[in-house]
Amino acid sequence: MLDTELAIIGAGPAGMAAAIEAANCGIASVLIDEQQSVGGQIYRDVERVAPLRGAMLGQDFLDGLPLAEGTHSPLITHLAGAVVWQVEKDGTITCSVKDQARQIKAQRILIATGAIERPMPLPGWTMPGVMTVGAGQILLKQSGLIPNKAVLIGSGPLLYVLASQMLKAKTPPLAIIETQTMGDLTKAMKHIGGALRGWRYLLKGTKLLSALKMGGVKRYTGASNIRLEGEGAVASVSFQCGARSHTIPCDTALLHHGVVPNVQISRALQLDHHWDAQQACFSPSLDEWGKSSEATIFIAGDGAGIGGAKAADLCGRIAALKLASELGKLDEENLQQRAAPLKSALLKENAARPFLDRAYPPFKDAQSPQDKTIVCRCEEVTAGEIRKTIALGCQGPNQLKAFLRAGMGPCQGRGCGLTISTLFAEQTGKSMQEIDYFTIRSPLKPITLGELASLKQKDVERLF
Amino acid sequence: MKTASGFNSLEDASGASQSLVPVRFDGQDYMLPEGANLAASLLTAGVSVFRNAPATGAPRGPFCMMGVCYDCLVNIDGITQQACQTSVEANMNVCKPATPADLNTEDDHA
């Protein structure tokens, strides 16, 4: 058992910034992450990759470099390749490194596990060759891979970011098939004030779009009835724009319609969550410092609500300062003084968010998929089977597990949970808050008996 | 399944220092960059089907590349693991994980 003042789960922007800020206050932390190197998904492997293809990935990626370098502090212990599979309210974290389980006992925990892609169930989305835009980004960042014949499908700035990186690498996507409509943009305009306060994002977006236009990347907007087609692997995508039908042959189809907080750990801890209607996701309920309903557990970054990398960095620092004050390393006056500029920067950072959320809403056809579309990828359960089971009187997502095994495969509901709650709300007329979400239990990731057995006897007894 | 890869590797991708090591996937031998991401390396080598889904046997391949979806599950030296969370090591023996259909076949022989 490794004892520490502060354990931080996740070494993305929030986790790295928090560890650095905590170290500045004299707090030693253990920074736990699944990857071999710090950076998270947004700054994946940034220290190795920046010199190789930093120019192509752009400044937004290179911004992660000082953070990654800052984690090489004697006060920060980076536990790499560590898969966390249990977190307890008393501060005990159990994880596996290689095949060995180990435990960390922390006085305070900061969960910084970021976001996952919003599930985008479309006809044919389980075929090889269909991936997420996030996956496309990770392949490009970490491995220098670009799909030859790719289409990007969905909505949101990330589509433009990846498309422009692909363009820079001289392998542009065949098309961007976008689901947002002019109506969405019109509705977003009432938030334009905020967007102008966050003008850097608008400018960046405008620049990306004009670069794509210059580069001849074909964009379709207001697309509907999107189907991925092929025998055993994706070979084309078909869709409609208004009255016109289109089919585009492709090898790779990358999906994205926003990201949602990864709530796996906060749910397993049974912390309070709420339905965030603006972002159409469940988020943990936190105070202004990122403190959860459990006093010793904080959450920062996209896992606390989607704000992006810069906001995650600021949230991480704000949480770290409060943690430092609670651990007796920072007095109240210093806390307020140091947090004030961070908090005002965070407000500015989040100013454009309502505009973006409204301009690029989730794709309705994917939130409420066609009956034949698979919703639970692991157990191959379709929307139609789920609807039929709800009609039989199934009481909620947890009972659905018993009927259909939906959410009981290896991904433990990460890929279907939100869709299933949405289907229940739609059919029963109840609110998302009322329907709520799967109960998440440890182990949070599949583990072997060998890993469990590698814990000391007394630790194993504690687990049950 | 080995096909032409749907992916281009950028020239600088592997870095000059990365050495190629033998890895077996479903009985075929590949030379993959040591230490690189296993899922990405297999995709580059033209492997697109990593496993078959347990209920219908439908082919699956990497989807999220960040450890969330478990669609890149492969059997590595006897243990089912996510290829996207694994680094290439010399002489790894990788195959598609068994599905219930495989187990039933064994029962039939018994």
Image (cartoon, coloured by chain):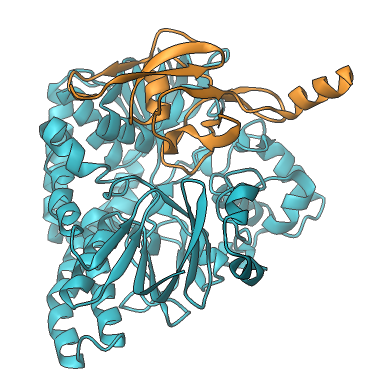
Chain colours: A cyan, B orange
Position of residue A156 in the picture relative to residue A71 (left or right)? right
Residue A323: where, in percent of width, then height? 30, 79
Whole-percent x, y for residue A92 in the image = 49, 71
- Regarding residue A412, the answer to whether it shows in the image is no
Residue A306 percent coordinates (x, y): 34, 57
Instruction: Work out whether residue A150 or residue A329 is closer to the camera in this orientation and state it.
Output: A329
In the picture, measured across the screen, residue A101 lies left or right of residue A290, that is: right
Which residue is at 32% across, 36% downward?
A138
Residue drawn at (87%, 17%) of the image:
B109
Q: Is residue B73 above or below residue A203?
A: above
Query: As drawn, is A218 to the left or to the right of A392?
Result: left
User: Does residue A270 show up?
Assistant: yes
- Please tell me which residue lies in front, A45 or B69: A45
Q: Horizontal and vertical percent for residue A156?
A: 32, 42
Quadrant of res A262: bottom left
The C terminus of chain A is located in which quarter? Answer: bottom right
Which is nearer the eye, A199 or A292?
A292
Picture residue at 39% right of the left edge, 60% below the top: A303
